[in-house]
Amino acid sequence: MSKAHDAGLSLSNAPSVLRQFLRGEAGGGALLIAASALALILVNGVPGAEQYYHDLLHLPLGHMLSAKLGEMTPHLWINDGLMAIFFFVVGLEIKREWLDGRLSSWDQRILPMIAALAGMAVPAIAFLFVTRLHFDLAAGWAIPAATDIAFAIGVLALLGNRAPLSLKLLLTTIAIVDDMGAVAIIALAYTSDISGAALLAAALIFGGMMAMNRLGIDRLWPYLGAAVALWFFVLLSGVHATIAGVVAAFAIPIRVTPGAPDAVESPLHRLEHALHPWSAYLIVPLFGFANAGVALGPEGMGALTHRLPLGIALGLFLGKQIGIFSAIWLCVKTGLAAMPRGATWMQVHGLALLCGIGFTMSLFIGGLAFPTRPDLVEEAKIGILAGSLISAICGFLVLRLAPLHPRHADVEAALDREIEIDGDTRG
């Protein structure tokens, strides 16, 4: 078997990573919306289905991986197992963009990094302000700090060519930097009861993966086998198991090939092409289905006035748009970065609104923030759903009604040609 076809991961006739990513996120976002809507319908619209829904997700499967998690259930396998694959794909995307993509130089990194950091800090501040004096809620500060790229790109896809391509690219890079921050938050803020022995074993496995990388081993199966072992020991260590996905991705070899980012010789690109459809079309929608089923009756909707869901909803809707729009405005006005090509300020505001769609990552962090308080997890879901939905609707309307840039058609054609040429568009 040739290296180019290791594990059947061929890139022959594949489109650019960037084009495939945008197309895949749009379709995955639509499927995520449908799966989450199905969960909401089952819980709220089908008599008796709510109990079956919860019983199925929490059905004991008769085996245990760690004493901390207890007996495994479908819900645990989705959140701690399948989501590790999602985070693995996130790690691959981060590494590719940082070394061979839209974040490969500092002039490209400035705008998305500042925007993403502001878009995480301001929602957290808004949340802490709303929940002040309620110290038992403080652990949820990071819930409104995340952006759901699949959901947001899915909304942008509904706008067709009215959404400038430069904004889609900027949204993608902001969300990738946002993912870096979310991973760091999960590792640092939502980790407890560390097992030194398990963490040491995980570190040794990662060291072995990096050694394989340095030795020039580019077959993928040794890395994938080591990644499974790394996931298991991280699970035992007390650090959330999904962090293993990102860490393992950083060890996958990449061939930096400017102008040909889909080169068959790059193991990372082959692996990303192979795993991204599974992540976008199966894992993320399944996670949405397993975590979005929350009761929205009078009692559930009444919870929106509680401090926790209110803080999350306002953090997503107000905090995100204020933080990201202000950061982009300041960067452009001070000359730190250029205005996204072919976009108007009204369209940038629409982008900032769409960044308030937290959903997947917010739901994930919500479960980590209150592991012993299922009532607060359910309240957090209501705030996430409300904030994300309002952000999606308002962002869609702003972008749909915003006048197009005078040079919209010319800029779109130029950006589209750049993607076709090298898959590394400069927005």
Image (cartoon, rainbow, N blue to C red):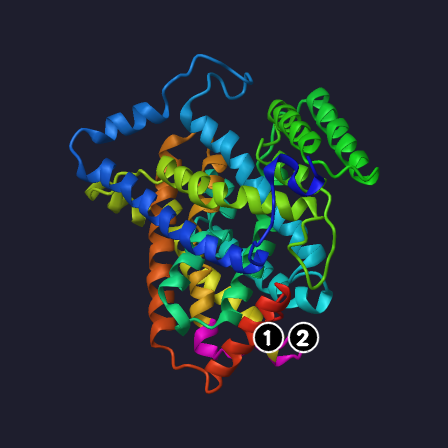
Residue shown at 54%/65% (left/top)? 169
Say left or right for 206 vs 163.
right
Span highlighted in magenta in the image: 333-348
Which residue lies under the disc numbered 1? 330
Q: In the rendered image, which quarter is residue 174 located in?
A: bottom right
Quadrant housing the N terminus: top right
**Counting residues from the N terminus, which is met first, the one under dot 2 or under dot 1?**
1
Q: Which mark is residue 76?
A: none
On the picture, is 219 further left or further right than 309?
right
Measured as percent of width and height from the top left, residue 101 is found at 66, 60
Q: Are marks 2 and 1 in contact (CB under 8 Å)?
A: yes
Q: Nearer the viewer, residue 339 or 122?
A: 339
Numbered disc 2: secondary structure: loop
Q: Residue furthest left?
A: 47
* View extreme (bottom): residue: 406
Above or below for 242 versus 198: below
In the image as oriented, which residue stretches furthest toward the right? 215
Amino acid on which disc 2 is placed? Leu
Give, as a three-letter code, the residue at label 1: Leu
Reply yes or no: does residue 424 show up in magenta. Answer: no
Q: Secondary structure at mark 1?
A: helix
Please tell me the numbered disc located at residue 336.
2
